[in-house]
Image (tube, helix red, strand yellow):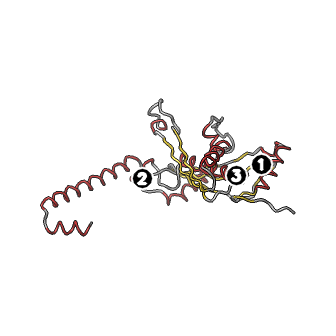
Amino acid sequence: MTKDSILNGINVTQLTETIDAIRKNPEIAKFRFRATNQWMEGTHNRATVKDFYGALQEDTSRKPLVFEIDEPPVLLGNNVGANPVEFVLVGLSGCLTTSLIAQAAVRGIEIKGLSTRLEGDLDLRGFLGISEDVKVGYEGIRVYFKIDADIPEDKKEELVRLAAKYSPVYNTVANPVPVKVLLDKGKSLSRTSAAACRGLDRRHSGAAGSRGPAAFFARRSAQAALEDGTRKLHDSTMGHRTPCAAGVQSSCA
């Protein structure tokens, strides 16, 4: 019995066998992934991933994977979870990483370390409907790879290009893909169960008066005013150069 070849944690033997099987029967390659989402309260909602279809059958083998989704206080949320556009960056980083590791493995390249840093630029004027000239989604996304491997820089660059070329999430984000957003006319969610879900989650919610951009910037302005007053008092005191003031300055430093 031949021992499987494993590199970078990827079973290259199984990967090769899977590719060969799909070439013989393309239907094996057809997958359908699913997710559900339940609104909790305010900007907080909860997404769940469990079953999917792939390799000619339904797969229900894993336990539900739950993702808390929210916004920071400046965007009316309570930081219960990352916000949706951050999840886009998370999904992109994960897919690019998996893609690069697999590409390296099939090429016999050992990866000792790999990390990514992502940035996305978004102008809220589009989302808020303030300007039709501003894009609603990300205006641009940048991904930076750090690769620790005993290969030349040009080979690392090649791996980065291959990672993007064969990443489903990268290609979903970078290229137009049909998305239908429809009203589900099936059985409605019971108001009792929906309210119960929100009730269980109220422990995450802050006081209504302390939330929102206006309150956030008001707190920031108050803090800035306090700091400004403290600085002016400090400058005035230091201007007189009293021994006590100088001593406090020294001890604080």
Where in the figure is residue 25, as x and y percent of width and height? 85, 44
Residue visible at 65% across and 36% down? 177
Depth check: give the residue in front, 182 or 242. 242
Q: Is residue 27 left or right of residue 91?
A: right
- At label 2, which amino acid type do we have? Ala
Q: Residue at x 73, y 51 (%)?
A: 106
**Residue at the spot of label 1:** 54
The kind of residue tagged 3 is: Ala
Q: Nearer the viewer, residue 3 or 85?
A: 3
Which image quarter holds the C terminus?
bottom left
Residue lying furthest front in this view?
A: 152
Residue 96 position within the rendered picture, expressed as x and y whole percent measured from the top left? 63, 48
Q: Which tag is nearer the camera, tag 1 or tag 3?
A: 3
| Residue 179 lies in quadrant | top right
Which of discs 3 and 2 lies nearer the camera? The answer is: 3
Q: Secondary structure at mark 2?
A: helix
**Residue 5 percent location from the top left of the image:** 77, 59
User: Disc 2 to disc 1, how far (Cα)?
Assistant: 45 Å
Q: Secondary structure at mark 3?
A: helix
Q: Which residue is mark 3?
A: 102
Residue at the spot x=54%, y=45% of the render? 85
Residue 40 shows up from this direction: yes
The local crowd at label 1, few if under 14, some if 14 to 19, many if 20 or more residues have their Cα within 10 Å, is some
Mark seen at residue 208: 2
